[in-house]
Every structure is written in C-alpha cells, then in structure tokens.
Amino acid sequence: MLITELGYFALLAAFILAILQVVLPTVGIMRDHVAWQRLAPSLAWAQFAAMITSFAALMAGFYYNDFSLVYVTQHSNTLLPWYYKLSATWVVMRVHCCFG
C-alpha cells in the first residue's frame, strides 16, 4: 500500500531531520554562523510535520486493514469497527511507550 510506504519515508525523514536539528545549530554555535543557529525552529517544525505524516499513514494502515504492517497485524482484525481501529493506533502506542 502506497500510504504506508509514504509513512515509512516520512519516519526516515523525521529521523534525518532530528539529526540535522542537533548537528547544524551546534556547529553554528561553535563556528558563529547565526544562519545555522536559526535553522533549529524550522527543522523542528519540519520534523513535527514528518512525524504527523508518519502517524497518519499508520492510522490509514489500521483503517484499511493493511496487514503487511506487523504492527497492524498484531493489534487489529477485520471485524473491528473503524473507530476502534483508529483508537487502537493511539492506545497501543501509549501502552508500548509506557510499559515497553
């Protein structure tokens, strides 16, 4: 499914943006490049947009029963109503964040 591939790409983009968000302003401070220092807020917003896109793609995977995703396969089935599928995306993520 193309939507899940977009989500994977957005997640990789968010990871790269996070690395750039650390490296570029730090190098800008060390070399006194004000323009590089001012990149931090823009990179943070771009990272936020990439993460939202990735999460929306995961929700679409739940909604459309994309069982090619292991996460969807483990936590969903075809008999769930759509609102349970979408809430499962958030609830399962919260459980994994809190309890490993």
Image: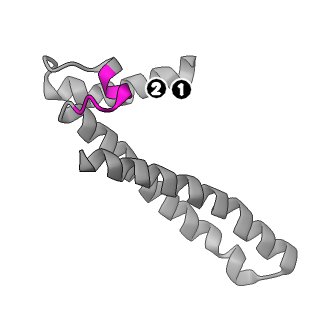
Identity of the residue drawn at 86% across and 73% down: 30
Q: Which residue is mark 1?
A: 97
Quadrant of the image for the C terminus? Answer: top right
Could you say whether the residue bearing mark 2 is in a helix, strand or loop?
Answer: helix
Q: Is residue 62 left or right of residue 31?
A: left
Q: Amino acid at mark 2?
A: Arg
All told, the count of numbered labels is 2
Above or below residue 37? Residue 56 is: above
**Image colouring:** one colour
Provide residue 17's location: percent of width, then percent of height: 57, 60
Q: Residue at x 34, y 53 (%)?
A: 6
Q: Position of residue 78 (x, y in %)?
A: 15, 21
Check the picture and name the quadrant holding the N terminus: top left
- Look at the image and give the residue range highlighted in magenta: 66-73
Residue 70 located left or right of residue 79? right
Q: CA distance from mark 2 to mark 1?
A: 5 Å
Q: Quadrant of residue 42?
A: bottom right
Q: Which mark is residue 94?
A: 2
Callout 2 touching callout 1 (CB < 8 Å): yes
Left or right: 6 in relation to 33 = left
Viewer-nearest residue: 34 or 1: 1
- The percent coordinates of residue 60 (x first, y second) are 24, 40
Tag shown at residue 81: none
> In this image, 46 relative to 5: left or right?
right
Location of residue 94 in the rendering, given as x and y in whole percent from the top left corner: 46, 26
- Number of residues whose C-alpha sits closer than 10 Å to that of mark 1, classed few (under 14), some (14–19) or many (20 or more): few
Q: Is residue 17 magenta?
A: no
Residue 72 figure quarter: top left
Looking at the picture, which amino acid does disc 1 mark? Cys
Q: Secondary structure at mark 1?
A: helix
Residue farthest right in this picture: 30
